[in-house]
Image (tube, helix red, strand yellow):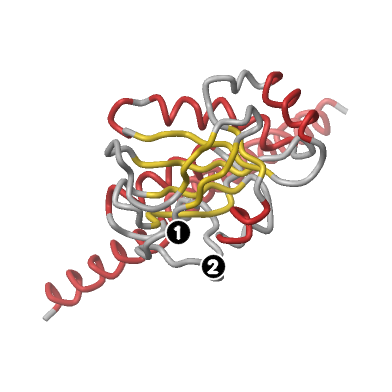
């Protein structure tokens, strides 16, 4: 009886050790995969105006009746970040504080404009009040959304001070929003393009060393 108990304990410890080794191996593999997976930037649609093109200047009245100019060269030297949101979009609500934070960063030098369309203006006014958007223009314009071919929300468009489209895309996280600014700073349309460029440079360097 005692001998059987000792054998069962030995087998149990062997199984525990094997299981621990398997877990460590899996953890290591997860770490390797995490390093290899490229970061995901904002999902940029292929339709609509292209990055680098001059945007059309539009004068639109906001929900408070003030005229807002969106697109075209800026008269104050600031970039313009247009954030398309909706009262029915839960992700939009969570990203509004992030958009405010990025726009208020001095190095970014940008104006922040919120945009939507449809529904009654009273609902958008209540929505803007709930999100504390009193310091930011909030426009309702179907034409603005159609000009950038916005199909899903939240969607952001970054227009340079010279009026050219710097970046655009579907944004669901802070990283997506930041990738739009990085795209403007680096001159590369998307973060995925940047990762591809870095990979190509690395492969070229490896080939040169091999030769």
- Image depth: mark 1 or mark 2 in front: 1
| Residue at x-position 36% and y-position 66% | 196
Q: Which residue is mark 2?
A: 48
Q: Is residue 67 above or below residue 33?
A: above
Observer-nearest of 97 and 39: 97
Element under label 1?
Answer: loop
Q: Quadrant of the N terminus?
A: top right
| Residue at x-position 35% and y-position 46% | 182
Q: Which numbered circle lies on residue 116?
A: none
Whole-percent x, y for residue 72 in the image: 38, 53
Whole-percent x, y for residue 198 in the image: 28, 61
Left or right of 37: which side holds 1? right
Cα distance in 3D space between marks 1 and 2 = 12 Å
Q: Quadrant of the C terminus?
A: bottom left
Left or right of 2: which side holds 111? left
Mark 2 closeness class: few <14, some 14–19, many ≥20 residues within 10 Å: few
| Residue at x-position 51% and y-position 43% | 82
Whole-percent x, y for residue 11 in the image: 73, 39
Q: Which residue is mark 1?
A: 56
């Amino acid at each position: 009886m005692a001998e059987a108990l000792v054998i069962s304990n030995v087998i149990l410890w062997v199984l525990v050790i094997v299981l621990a080794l398997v877990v460590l191996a899996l953890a290591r593999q997860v770490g390797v995969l995490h390093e290899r997976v490229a970061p995901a930037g904002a999902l940029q649609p292929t339709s609509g105006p292209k990055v680098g093109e001059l945007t059309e200047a539009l004068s639109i009245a906001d929900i408070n009746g003030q005229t807002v100019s969106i697109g075209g060269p800026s008269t104050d030297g600031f970039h313009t970040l247009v954030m398309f949101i909706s009262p029915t979009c839960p992700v939009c609500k969570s990203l509004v504080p992030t958009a405010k934070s990025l726009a208020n960063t001095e190095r970014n030098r940008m104006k922040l404009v919120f945009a939507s369309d449809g529904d009654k203006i009273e609902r958008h006014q209540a929505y803007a009040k709930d999100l504390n958007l009193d310091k930011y223009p909030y426009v309702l314009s179907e034409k603005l959304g159609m000009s950038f071919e916005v199909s899903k929300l939240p969607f952001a468009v970054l227009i340079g001070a010279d009026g050219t489209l710097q970046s655009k895309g579907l944004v669901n996280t802070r990283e997506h929003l930041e990738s739009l600014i990085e795209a403007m700073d680096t001159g590369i349309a998307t973060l995925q393009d940047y990762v591809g460029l870095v990979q190509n440079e690395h492969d070229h360097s490896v080939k040169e060393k091999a030769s």
